[in-house]
Image: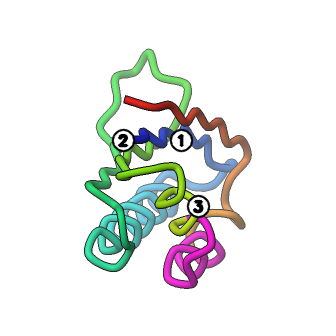
């Protein structure tokens, strides 16, 4: 099994727009769970404490490193990323590890 964790900090934008963007990312990514072969689960965490310095966290599990690669190249994943994530992100941090 492989964990794929991403932290995102959004670009500066009005609070209401940021809230809407976060919800679009969450719903778009979590809808992929049954569309990606080898994906075990996917969660976008948006509930955060005031001590946080990231806006969102992606936490997903894959059956293998190959399944993670399939996810990264998947057109449905890239549509969500290109539409709702990449244009609005200031910072992205990622860690992948075997469990």
Please tell me whether mark 1 or mark 2 is closer to you in this view: 2
Image: 49 above or below 75? above
Which of 3/66 is in front? Answer: 66
Image: 58 above or below 50? below
Q: CA distance from mark 1 to mark 2?
A: 17 Å
Q: CA distance from mark 3 to mark 2?
A: 13 Å
Q: Main secondary structure of the magenta part?
A: helix
Q: In terms of image quadrants, where is residue 78?
A: bottom right
Identify the residue at horizontal 69%, vertical 50% (top origin). 11
Label 3 sits on residue: 69
Identify the residue at horizontal 47%, vertical 60% (top origin). 67
Which image quarter is the C terminus in?
top left
Label 2 sits on residue: 1
Q: Position of residue 86 (x, y in %)?
A: 68, 63
- Asked if the magenta segment contains residue 81, the reply would be yes
Q: Relative to residue 74, is residue 27 drawn left or right?
A: left
Q: Residues within 10 Å of mark 3 (few under 14, many from 20)?
A: few
Which of 9/62 is in front? Answer: 62
Magenta stretch bounds: 72-83
Q: In terms of image quadrants, where is residue 47?
A: top left
Sequence-first tag of 3 and 2: 2
Identify the residue at horizontal 55%, vertical 25% (top origin). 53
Which of 74/53 is in front? Answer: 74
Which of 47/19 is in front? Answer: 47
Label 1 sits on residue: 6
- Which numbered marker is on residue 63? none
């Amino acid at each position: 099994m492989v964990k794929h964790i991403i932290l995102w900090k959004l670009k500066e934008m009005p609070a209401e727009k940021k809230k809407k963007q976060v919800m679009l990312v969450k719903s778009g990514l979590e809808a992929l769970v049954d569309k990606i072969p080898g994906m075990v689960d996917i969660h976008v965490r948006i509930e955060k404490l005031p001590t946080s310095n990231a806006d969102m966290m992606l936490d997903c599990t894959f059956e293998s490193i190959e399944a993670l690669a399939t996810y990264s190249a998947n057109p449905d994943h890239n549509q969500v990323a290109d539409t709702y994530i990449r244009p609005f992100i200031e910072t992205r941090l990622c860690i992948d590890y075997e469990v």
